[in-house]
Amino acid sequence: MIEHFPNHCKISEDEEDAGMYFNSGYLNNSRLDFKDYSKPLVVGSCGTYRLKKRPKLPTFWAKGRRDYQILYVASGKAHFWFDGVEEVVTSGHMVLYQPKEIQKYVYYVEDHPEVFWIHFTGYDVKNILNYHGIPLDKHVFYSGTLPDYKMLFRKIIRELQQCEYGYEDYIASLFNIILLLVSRQQQESEKTTTSIPEEIEAAVAYFNENYNTKVSVDDYAESLHISTNWFIRNFKQYMKISPAQYILSLRMVNAQSLLENTEYNIGEIAEIVGYDNPLYFSRVFKKEYGVSPAQYRKNLEESTENEKDSL
């Protein structure tokens, strides 16, 4: 069954009310769930929530939806109910809902949740999920907390909002990359252990919440009454990068998103992601991406103009 909607796009949906941050994009600007068996994989919508002051955000679909959904808990935790039983899902995990499954979950502000979600359909979804080791017989699975996930989800949101040439296939390929990274993380976790120490999970949540402040790894370890060497060694074992590198990657991914999706100048972006000196920020950004922030934005604008001209 294929359902078609008017072919137009909403340029931006980025809201920040008194209590939460919300950003999302929808295929053909339609919020309706749908089935589409014309392609192996079709992304219908993608978005993110982050509570700030709002006490809670509940979701309940009594009859489920017609498409699939994956939710990624990037930081903090979220509360889900499966078969009437509550399960707390922590950062570094994803939740899969299949079509027609009851969906009930709640985000609480005290849990500091940051969640990304994506709805998808297609004639080969089950094979794609199986290929990447995503279990179809349970809801929660391990994904790790790679900064790449945020970058990829935000790219999908942006593509759904701007509807540039070939975006339907592009967002499907970006989602495939996310699934590939999940399977890679699962393979890596099997080589070590399936459980992440609470200290590391708490650190990941703390860094995600405070990456744009002056975070001292030494002071953070001391606040937990653990040695800095132990903390760095164990963080790197489970996250595959050091705490300092993880904080840097969060700053760079968020700077990249701001360059792509806002009109803030370089100095403002530097301050938002935690740098007092715009010149130092530019040097760090260039080291990571090979171009300065200004050149990165210029390249993006030129690419967008070229794609528009080719239509």
Image (cartoon, rainbow, N blue to C red):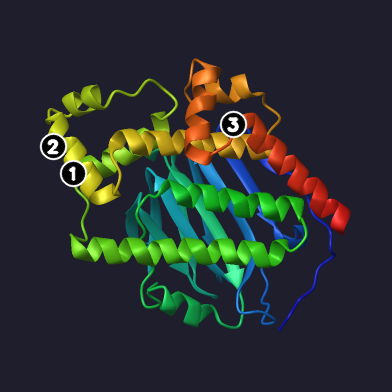
**Residue drawn at 84 percent across, 63 percent down:** 7
Q: Which of the numbered marks, if any, corresponds to residue 292?
A: 3
Q: Quadrant of residue 15?
A: top right
Q: Tag 3: residue type?
A: Ser
* Cα–Cα gap, marks 3 and 2: 35 Å
Which residue is found at the position 85% from the left and 65% from the top? 6
* Label placed on residue 230: 2
Give the mark nearest the N terminus, 1 or 3: 1
The span from disc 1 to disc 2 (Cα, nearest Å) is: 6 Å
Disc 1 or disc 3, which is closer to the eye? 3
Q: Residue flagged by tag 2: what amino acid is it?
A: Trp
Is 104 placed above or below 115 here?
Answer: below
Name the quarter where the N terminus is drawn: bottom right
Label 1 sits on residue: 234
| Residue sticking out furthest to the top | 276
Splitting the image into 4 quarters, where does residue 110 fall?
A: top left
CB of mark 3 within 8 Å of CB of mark 2? Answer: no
SS of the residue at dot 2?
Answer: helix
Residue closer to the observer: 238 or 79: 238
Quadrant location of the C terminus in the rendered image? bottom right
Q: Residue 176 location in percent, x, y?
A: 52, 67
Residue located at (17% from left, 41% from top): 233
Residue at 40% across / 29% down in the picture?
A: 210
Q: Secondary structure at mark 1?
A: helix
**Amino acid at dot 1:** Asn
Q: Position of residue 279 (x, y in %)?
A: 54, 19
Q: Is residue 13 visible?
A: yes
Identify the mark at residue 94; answer none if there is no mark. none
Q: Nearer the viewer, mark 3 or mark 2?
A: 3
Quarter-of-image position of residue 72: bottom left
Q: Are marks 1 and 2 in contact (CB under 8 Å)?
A: yes
Task: Give the class, few, some or many, for how many residues have Cα within 10 Å of label 1's Cα (few <14, many ≥20).
Answer: some
